[in-house]
Amino acid sequence: MKQLSLLFLFMAFVSCGQKELPFGQYQEAISLNGTWQFLASNNIGKDQLLTADYSSWDTLKVPGNWDTRSRYADFVGRGFYRKEFQIPDDWRGKHVRVHFGAVYQTSKVWLNGQFLGEHVGGYTPFGFNVTDVIKREGSNSLVVMADNSYNRGAWWPWGGISREVTLEAHEPIRLVSQHISAIPDFERDEVQFAIRYRLKNNSSKTVKADIRATIDQQQDTVYATKDVAPGEEVFSEIKFNRSLADYKLWCVDAPNLYSLTSQVTVDGKTVDLDTDKFGIRKFEVRGEQFFLNNKPVRLNGVNRVHDHPSYGNTEPDPLVRKDMMDIKYNLGGDFARLMHAPYSENLLDLCDSIGFLLVGEIPVWGDDDPQAFPDNPLTKQWLKEMVERDYNHPSVVAWSVGNELRDPKGEWSEKAMTTAQYKYVNSMLDYVEKLDATRLKTYVTITSYRQGEVGTEPYEKVDFISMNSYGEAMKLAQKTHEKFPGKPIFISEIGKSQIGPAPAAELSEELVTELKGLKNLPYVTGFSIWSYNDYRSKYKGTPATGFREWGVVNERRERKKAYYQLKEVFSFWEK
């Protein structure tokens, strides 16, 4: 009798362990980072891939780039990753997604032999619903192909899974995203808040989702309700105004941050909870000047290439922190379009916390870019993924749709500029404004100062002109201003040939004079020198070392004489 009672107790314990746990009582995400099996091959087929002897493969760390390893340093093509994992026991009945922070450039993903899908774009996140594919018990096999054959620009096309990989569990009703804008109205002395939610219903019945949004632990709470049909993805928006006196603004010297926590309930039960930081600030253009929080500003910076010999473009926290703190607090930079591609999330978080202003850009670059055609669905996808991911970051004050689009021969051609630059840029500026009308928009030109009809550049649609210059910057800025008056000009890149190796390389006297002289042009809002760091490249003109020596520090962050010259120039602008 005692044995039978023990058996019933054991069965009851097992049965209880199999019940679906409510939200908040299970681990919502597990990391798939760490050691993965790896094979570099341009010859393996799908059938071979899915039946391979994975134990014979090499191993690599994720996040990581294969080309940081000497044996794969120059490999271009397809790299295959494989990870075996189990899901937690308490995920019974949960919907499951696999999320990739970024894979360069073209990726394909299989789970347990089933093809999940393909993603093109090396710097933005993507994911798949694997609820019907994943094994609840036993091992799962995740295989990822990364192809780095595509290359634009002078930076190295680091191959591999370069950002986090996460497995996520959620309820049938999921909060896909929450976007908050918090813009001060100085005439009315209030903050205009707008929170836009995206909800997904993966259940088989219509549900009423209640949303409770709280700013900083009960300081301010608002509510919304939305009916969501089965399989439907819907948007819900809450707008409200508050007294400006109750909040602190975000700016370069005082980057005050708040937390937005949103709780989604169905029938009184919590089904999702999400928290994002945000800042309250207004970055705008008035005439030919930038204004931040109702005050005119002129801001300088330095471009930074996501590149390091040991880390590739994976952007580990210590490197990002060391670089950006150096740029902000030692050099004195405040504003830049750092790179021609979406930034890593940890860099965005850091810039939010230190007050560094950013322009986000997608990698459409230079002579005869194959993506530079109007209404390109791929570049729209890149813009959408970048904007949706980065929307809540107060450090991001503008979007750029491309860099240095021009005649493939490098010559002025009205026909080429009209077809490639104008039509592409024109359509993408329209699209990015639909995605986010709260930020400024621009593109980077290297032809604004050339002869030709004004109509060859869609400058009317940009909020400010971003112009690159590698010689005669003052003269070219003046020409641009004469041709396109009434708008601020930001020198988004400036330089004068490669600086040279550390530690003795320096900025030319001519460049230093130009950098200081730009201060005398009131319509020039600032400049950003190319670049902070030397970086790996296979672009023409790269030294035998394999690193382009444009930086004020080298690839290992050893300072050059140019570093101290730039610091002095920044100080000159502040006087």
Image (cartoon, rainbow, N blue to C red):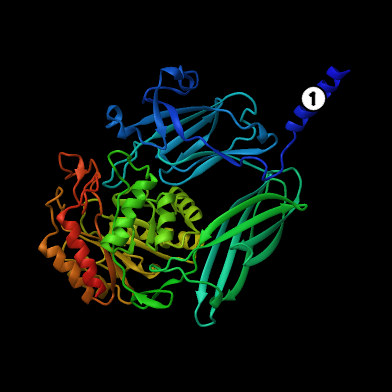
174 relative to 118 in the view: left or right: right
Classify 10 Å Cα crowding around label 1: few (below 14), some (14-19), many (20 and above): few
Quarter of the view holding residue 5: top right
Q: Secondary structure at mark 1?
A: helix
Quarter of the view holding residue 262: bottom right
Q: Position of residue 546 (x, y in %)?
A: 20, 39
Total labels: the figure holds 1
Q: Quadrant of the N terminus?
A: top right
The residue to which callout 1 is attached is 11
Q: Closest to the observer: 306 or 521?
A: 306
Q: Residue furthest bottom?
A: 187
210 relative to 393 in the view: left or right: right
260 relative to 296 in the view: left or right: right
Q: Closest to the observer: 501 or 126?
A: 501
- At a point 33% along the width and 55% down the height, the residue shown is 324
Q: Closest to the observer: 206 or 568?
A: 568
Quarter of the view holding residue 36: top left
Q: Position of residue 267 (x, y in %)?
A: 78, 52
Residue 18 in sight from this viewpoint: no
Q: Amino acid at mark 1?
A: Met
Q: Closest to the observer: 39 or 321?
A: 321
Q: Residue furthest right?
A: 1
